[in-house]
Each structure stands twice: as structure tokens, then as C-alpha cells.
Image: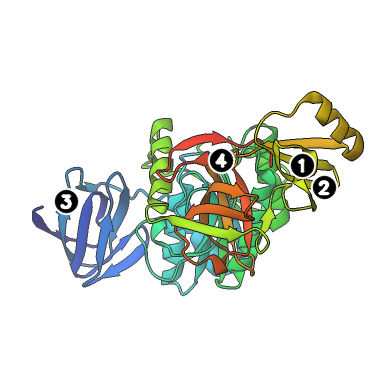
Amino acid sequence: MKLSQLSLKPGDVYRIEGQLSLEVKVGKVTISGGLREKGERVVIPRAKSVPMEVESDSVIEYTLGADGKVERLTERTIPKEWDNLIADVIKKRPKTILVMGNVDVGKTFLTTYMGNTLLRHGMKMGAVDSDVGQADIGPPTTMGLGIFERPVALLYEVPLRSAYFVGSMSPSGHTLEFVAGMKWLVEHGLKKADLVVVNTPGWIMGGPGRALQLYVEELIDPDMVVALQRGTELEHLLAPIASHKIRRLPVSTKVRARSPSERSNLRGMLLGKYFEDSETLVLDLKRVRFERTYLKTGHQLNAGEFGRQVVYAEKIPEGIILVTKGRMDDEALSSIESKFGQVKIIRAGAEQNVIVGLVNDSNELVGLGIVEKINFERGQIVITTPIKNADQVTSVQFGSMKVKPTGEEVGTVRPGYF
């Protein structure tokens, strides 16, 4: 790739698009609001673009990949309302800010720009990323907390400090996990940063979407609610919120929308990358707890009493769980039901490929895993995961997706099945 040099004047505005590698040789520029000075390097990956604004007479050297581009613009891409909001934040020092917006309105870039700009003014900002499908902070199926400790060009460069396992690539059917997770991450973030900005999902319509947004707002009780909208698409969510909290912002003209196929491909790529260096981890069922499942919440029974098809039996308050190798006849089931109440049948092997969260004794997510097998006879659960040390894991949280280590989605688990 050819090395190029460019002289810049104060006030110049550029859009830099990857694949691109850049070094500041002279002067000062800001990239995504983050100050970059002499000797600092920035790498922008393919299909990503960010604004560069020139603070002083400067010289940069850069190399471009096949799709890389350095384009001078006639005006800023950052709306003045964004800078007014940040000035207000610097003045009033809120502790929590909630950012609402539809998909593809620039919530991620607003968060990046805000974190970088506040850092220049001596404020350390935490960011909660709730995009469980295309997460920038943390792996897919989780919500992540990152802390701005240095300038970044893109949000994924912010280091992960804590994560909460949702167990799906979508908030649909997981409202409780989202609400609990955001509250948990905000509380952790406030111990490590001056303020926390929470990006809510782009699910803003319909009963479940309304409920998710409004209960998150109610539980977190933010000092500010930022509504990033093109028109009035968020007004139904803002109506119940005290007007003094609300800051309405326009969408940047340079926001790029992702197609459904791009989103799907990105989900698979990110998940596959996470599991690249995975190995098999064997956990003792007597040592680890199960969460978000009926299994291991009751009293284990002697499976042999229920016939040859049954490999595991457990009495729970709702009835009885039977893990079976095949179909049980109706007469046997009726007899069990009359004695124990509701019978929950789980087919042995149905757990294969279910994504799980692996949690330590401090209730911190240490990593993700994919279930290979629950071996009830040996009292083991076998998991594919990049986590190497079984002693780190004290609890297994069950998700609702089935995936392969390549990142391919191969099914779902209906709520309550396990």
C-alpha cells in the first residue's frame, strides 16, 4: 500500500474511511472527537468511516487499503446540538444518561463522540452497549460495559470492563434480562466512571418494545434522556418522561444504515471470532449452579424408577422433570403425572449447541460457551469455550439460541424448555 502525506489547516473537516492506517506527524487533529497528537496512530477497518477535524496546522501520513478513502468535506458532520448537549453535560455533571433511538440513527457514534470529548475535559465516561447482535463492547448475546480511558476512533476499541449475558441476539422475549442487565451494568459503571451512558436497543415500537424502553428508564432513573431521532418517532416513549430530563437531538447526515444481510453476516462473524480459540471444558454438575433453567433447581430422584428411557429425574415445585432417550408411552406418563403432578419432558441431546454464559462466584460473566452435552450419568456438562480454567466457573446461565463455534445460528430454545 502506498504511503501518502497530507497537510491540514485548522478548521478543515475530513471523512476517513477504512481500510486506512494514519499517523499524525505534526499538529493536532480530532478523530471521532478524540484528540490525536504527534506520533499517534489510528487504524480504521474496512467498511467503517469516522470524521476527522483539524485543531492546528498539521501533517498526517496514511496508507489506504482497497476501499480506503480520505475525503475533504465542506462542513462538519457533527450537528451543533450534539456539542450543546456535551457542553451541558460538562456543566451539570449528570451521573446517568439514557440514549434512545431507532436502528441506524448513530447511537453508537454519538456515544463514542461523547466519551472522547468528555475525556478531553477530564471526565471519565462509562458506556453500556445493549446491541446484543452486533455488540461493539463485549461478545454477541451480551451487553457490555466499557470505560473511556483513552481516545478511540470506534466504540469497539473501548475495553470491556463488565458484561451481562442475555442469551440471544435480539431483545425480543428477553425484556427481563435486558432490564436487569442494564441496571446491573450501570451500578458497576458508576463505581468506575464519572458518568454512565446507556444505549438502549433500537426496538421502539409495539408493546414489548415500549415496555423495554420505559421500564429501563424507570429503573435506571437517568439524569438525562437523549432522544436521537429523524422526526417524531420517539415521542410516544418520551411522553411519560419528565420534560426537564429530555434532550432531543438530530441524526447526523453521515449515518450509514446496515442491511438485514449485513447485520446477519456481522453477527455470525463476531460470534465465530469469539469462539476461534475454543477448547472443551468439563464442569462438575455437583459444583456448578444452573441459572435461567428448571434443571438443578429441585431434588434429584432415582431415574431408574421411571423406566429405561429416563436418564435423569428431578422433583421441582411445579411437578417433575424427566430427561429421556426416547418417547415414553402414555400410560407410564399418566401414572407419573398422577403421583408428581405436571411432567416436563426434556429429550437427551436437546441441549447440544445451546449458548450459555459462564459466571464466577462474584456474579461476573467470565465468558461464553456452547453446550456439547450434559452427561447425567457422569454428572458432567461439557462445553466448548475459550475459557480454559474450570475453577473460574461457578454458574452456567442458559441462553435461548443454538449456535455452532463458527458463529452459525442453528436454532432456538423456547423459554421454559429446560
Q: For the residues carrying marks 4 and 2, which lies nearer the camera in this image?
A: 2
Question: Residue at the right extreme?
Answer: 338
**Real-space CA distance between mark 4 and mark 3, rounded to the nearest whole angstrom:** 39 Å
Picture coordinates of residue 311 (x, y %)?
69, 43
Picture coordinates of residue 117 (x, y %)?
42, 64
Q: Disc number at residue 93?
A: none
Q: For the residues carrying marks 1 and 3, which lies nearer the camera in this image?
A: 1
Q: Earlier in the sequence, mark 4 or mark 2?
A: 2
- Location of the C terminus by quadrant is top right
The residue shown at (52%, 53%) is 383
The residue shown at (40%, 31%) is 261
Find disc 4 in the rendering and name its residue: 401
The residue shown at (78%, 49%) is 302
Q: Are marks 2 and 1 in contact (CB under 8 Å)?
A: yes
Q: Disc number at residue 64?
A: 3
Element at badge 1? strand
**Real-space CA distance between mark 2 and mark 3, rounded to the nearest whole angstrom:** 61 Å
Find disc 2 in the rendering and name its residue: 316
- Which residue type does callout 1 highlight? Ile
Q: For the residues carrying marks 4 and 3, which lies nearer the camera in this image?
A: 4
Q: Are marks 1 and 3 in contact (CB under 8 Å)?
A: no
Find disc 1 in the rendering and name its residue: 321
Please say whether residue 129 is visible from this viewpoint: no
Q: Earlier in the sequence, mark 4 or mark 3?
A: 3
Viewed as shown, does residue 14 lie left or right of 359?
left
Q: How many marks?
A: 4
- Which residue type does callout 3 highlight? Leu
